[in-house]
Image (tube, grey):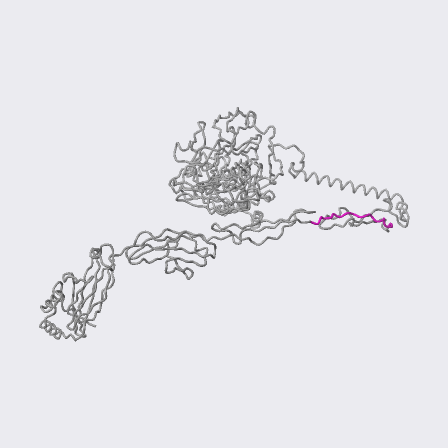
Amino acid sequence: MGREKSSAVMGQFSGGCYLSFATLVLLGSRVPATLARGARGEALQHGQSGTLPRFLEEPVDAYIVKSNPIKLQCQARPALQIFFKCNGEWVHQSQHLSQEHTDLGTGLKIREVMINVSRQQVEDFHGPEDYWCLCVAWSHLGTSKSRKASVRIAYLRKNFEQDPQGTEVPLNGMIVLHCRPPEGVPVAEVEWLKNDEPLNSDGVIDTRGDHNLIISDARLSDSGNYTCVASNIVAKRRSATATVVVFVNGGWSSWTDWSPCNVRCGRGVQKRSRTCTNPAPLNGGAFCEGMSVQKSTCNAVCPVDGGWGEWTEWSLCSSSCERQRSRECTAPEPKHGGRLCDGVALATDNCTGGLCTEDRKLLHDVKPQGVDNSSDVALYSGLAAGVVTVVLLIVAVTLYRRSQTNPLLINSSMQPDLTVSRTYTSPMCFQDSIDKELMAERSLLDPLPDLKIKGVAERAEYHVMSHPQTFPRGLAPDYRGVAVGTTLGRRGKNLLTPQVSLTPSRPLHKATAVFGHAGGRLVVPNTGISLLVPHGGIAEDTTWEMYMIINQEDSSTLFEEGPEIFLSPAVTYGPPGLDLSCPIAMTVAHCGEVAAGNWTIRLKRQMQDNKWEEVMSVDEESTSCYCLLEAQRCHVLLEHPGRYALVGEPLNQEATKRLRLAVFGSPDMSNSLGFTLRVYCVDDTPQAFQEVVVGERNRGGRLLEEPKMMLFRGNTFSLQVSIQDVPQLLWSIKPFTTCQEFSFSQVWASNQRPLQCAFSLERYSHSSSQLSCKINVRQVKGEEQILQVYTSVVENEKGVVPFFTQSDCTITSQTGSRAFKIPPSIRQRISATFDTANAKGKDWQLLAQKLHIDRNLCYFACQESPSSVILSLWEAQHQDSGDLDSLASALEEIGKVQSPATSTTLACSREEQDSAFAKLG
């Protein structure tokens, strides 16, 4: 309906008739007839029909928020005047804001009026009911009143009348969280949050009108932090957070099949087991009750070994002059897996005592017709000549084969000489392919056809004990790194031994072995540390007794110079007077996370004043040393004996080192109900963890969870270790011991020393035989790891602590060709080929590039045989894999890039190359 604004009046009226009329109304007197007639006349003039005012808009209930006034307004048609009346009193004319419209469709006047109500007005009113207002509208026929609108001050108190409480419920149980919001006007609306996100009911969650949250069928996903939120137009309030844990009680799996009887014969024991995994206890749920293993007696049928019966009588002599007899394996027969009889079942014998009969006459009595006695002489002479000829042939063949065979293989009884090969058959802790020593030497060199190989591969040699003359006279091994006296070198040459005085520190591990011209490998077992002595590095007539020692060092000497820490154990090798013609390759494990480039890694050597001097930085060029840094190991080429260590300087707080976490457990010997959990945090190197393993074996500890790796950042924040989800109804723990802490400096500069914290638990009764809990290890503002513990505290099965993929290694040395992946003769041919220059430059540089050794090449350029040193580094890098494919592939690629003239010289058939690589495969 179209409307047209005709006038607007604020605080006064446009017509005198209206003003008098309004004034009289306010004074409470009657309207004079003349004024009424004037009003009716004006009403008729405006086309107003004879109806009472009808409200098009009435005032609504309102709330005052803080100090902001609210507006009340109403609208009526037809209306000559509209006034507000609040709490029974008329609102003064000056407080009204009115405006007037004309309905174009009906010609009737529409009047709108608005007033403001302040907070002060409401607070000053003291009546039996709320502050209220209504509108009164006049027309020429009378008045009309609107509905009452209440005006209230809005608020919301801070404290909830009832906060929800945390609870633990079993899976499929009922969750009920009560919430009574704080008092407020208007009444607060309530919603629920889960983990600070609005709760999605998805048809399972019931939020009743009393604001309670009900989940009738709890699921694992219902675990979380729940918050009740109350809000109105004034504010929003959050209740205390209620933690809901939906736990799962453990359930037994099905029994396994009974194991075989543990004895081959007689009365034994068999057992079957089950695990608490159907389901596994979760979120602190109870562990399964009952035994996880059942044992039962069994009777194994004993095997019966077979026995021979009596021989039968000899048979009659046959036409072939033989007789036979037999026996059977029936006294007793073999049963139940017993062994068969040893020996023969049928025996044959000549029944004439060696002289066969023919027509019942002896052979020497039978003479063929026409042959006289002289023919016998010729026959025997021919037989004698034949025998002599055969003997001579056998002797000739034997001598020929002996001249073509390694003399050590012919005469195994000769005394071993340490300067030549010897054979040792005990198992070694090295991964090496047996096929390598059997393959033809040319198979590796087929990609380089000019390398013609003669002879056979040298066999391996292992030194078990020292030869009386294996160490140069006058020099004895010194495991503290201090040399004693002088020594005679090769061929009687006098060598002055430098005096090196190092502060002795506690030796954790050591290994020693004797090496000669054939070289070899020295290993400190189970530490990831080894030493490679190249073939030919020691003179042919000299042997050296070499050693390696791992010592525990202190970082305080490093801290004097800067924020450096040890990333590897300190390793000493010697003896100090060691005289080699080429560098040795030492492999050391480290714990630095070097991939991100947040470290400066340096190799340092301890000097006579016990200070550590920098040998080289891994990122810089050097001609005195070479470092090949990998993710977990560093391979170093060294020429001078001494004590070395890998240190790191963090460039920023993002620098990280690897920690290895492990939890061990054992019963408390002083308390039959007690059980102790020990948590270790050590640098992630085999040597550091090996010390933990040895200590736990001595005290009877068990590894309860597979060790885990954790990255520890150099952000100066501490490491916290806490125990969680201990079944409170079954176990107790000493107060204030559930969370323990290591300072940042303790962890950051642990220097391979194990950090340990212990949790002492006590079960309430002997019937509680299972323990389940979590060990949480976290760095503040860093990484976090969880160690899950499920163990039996009754059956203390002291098994071997899993550490290495193979059993603990005790063999520390390997000498001769078996210590190397590349046979020595092939190594010599490769070195001879690549040490010479060609039109494309130094061939050894191309070899280094193909083997991904492409930095600090100036070090190899200063060596007498760069190729040989490169191969030593490759040997150290691949000592575990035993894979020759990468070297063969590199040699094949180099063969393809030779110049045409060289290719003609080095040509070989494709069939030969295929055959060679087939052997490598």
Q: Is residue 419 visible?
A: yes
Q: Is residue 837 visible?
A: no
Q: 160 above or below 21? A: above
x, y percent for residue 786:
46, 46
Q: Left or right: where does residue 371 sit relative to residue 491?
A: right
Farthest-out residue, front = 128
Please name whichever residue, 878 or 165, is drawn nearer the observer in this view of the structure: 165
Please name whichever residue, 740 or 834, is drawn nearer the observer in this view of the structure: 740
x, y percent for residue 492:
56, 25
On the rendered image, what quadrant is the N terminus found in? bottom left
* Residue 418 sits in quarter: top right
Query: Number of callouts in the render?
Result: 0
Name the dominant secondary structure of the magenta segment. Answer: loop
Farthest-out residue, top = 485
Q: Residue at x 49, y 26 (%)?
A: 498
Q: Please say whether residue 785 is one of the residues in the magenta stretch.
A: no
Please name whichever residue, 875 or 159, is drawn nearer the observer in this view of the structure: 159
x, y percent for residue 719:
42, 41
Q: 74 above or below 279? A: below
Residue span colored magenta? 300-317
x, y percent for residue 873:
50, 39
